[in-house]
Amino acid sequence: DIQMTQSPSSLSASVGDRVTITCRASQDIDNFLAWYQQKPGKVPKLLIYAASALQSGVPSRFSASGSGTDFTLTIGSLQPEDVGIYYCQKYNSAPWTFGQGTKVDIE
Amino acid sequence: EVQLVESGGGLVQPGRSLRLSCAASGFKFDEYAMYWVRQAPGKGLEWVSGISWNGGIRDYADFVKGRFTISRDNAKNSLFLQMESLRREDTAHYYCAKDRLGSLGYFDSWGQGALVTVSS
């Protein structure tokens, strides 16, 4: 099965900082990648699909790119409400595996 | 508005069974694949199982194959997860999730989750 590895596992940044999270697939998954945000105590929320398409209603400070095995999620200007855990997930075929998550905090 | 409401969670002894249900509303249930995703306390997300719109295709994570069965009743807009031979490591919040568009394999709506605790 394809493994999804995120880095870093956690990060702390200041409000207004540009933040980048990476996700690496153990095999080529084309652009079949989604990103989710899970705020503390909340259910996950879809941010990005098809590696770079912004889900409706998601702020434009979120962007993503990548194809094949290497992907990135960028928060252009970190806001206090962006605190949470971010997960990538592959969906080229079952099993629909998630990365282990990246915890984002405010300094 | 899409609503997914899980039920059936609770405390169960190792080796016993439990059946989760998910009541769906706000969308044409029979046009979407549906999934179960779990999250152990303080841990990350784990996809558990998925079912196509008509139930013809069912997928399972290796760690539940042979123990869990996913099903759906389109007439009742409901999704189910029958869990057998439960283990302590199955303790988690179980989320019902809807495919974003048909059967793509990623999830645009989630329920609030049902907590399953496997303990003696």
Image (spheres, rainbow, N blue to C red):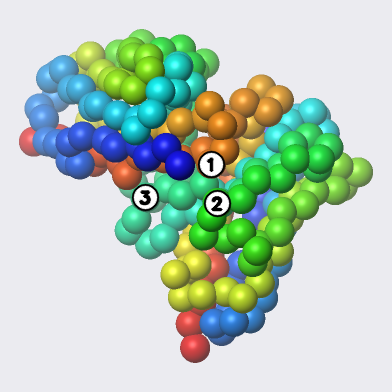
**Label 3 sits on residue:** B44
A20 or B15, nearer to the observer: B15
Q: Which label number is shown at residue B61? A: 2
Q: Position of residue B62 (x, y in %)?
A: 54, 55
Q: Which label number is shown at residue A95? A: 1
Query: Alpha-carbon distance for marks 1 and 2?
Result: 6 Å
Q: Position of residue B26 (x, y in %)?
A: 74, 32
**Disc 1 residue crowd, few under 14, some 14–19, many 20+, Cα 10 Å:** many
Identify which amino acid the numbered label 2 is placed on: Ala
Foreground mark, 1 or 3, reads 1
**Farthest-out residue, right:** B75
**Disc 3 residue crowd, few under 14, some 14–19, many 20+, Cα 10 Å:** some
Q: Position of residue B17 (x, y in %)?
A: 67, 76
At x 18%, y 22%, the residue is A19
Residue A15 occupies quadrant: top left
Mark 3 / mark 2, whichever is N-terminal: 3
Identify which amino acid the numbered label 1 is placed on: Pro
Residue A19 sits above or below residue A94 on the image: above
Identify which amino acid the numbered label 3 is placed on: Gly
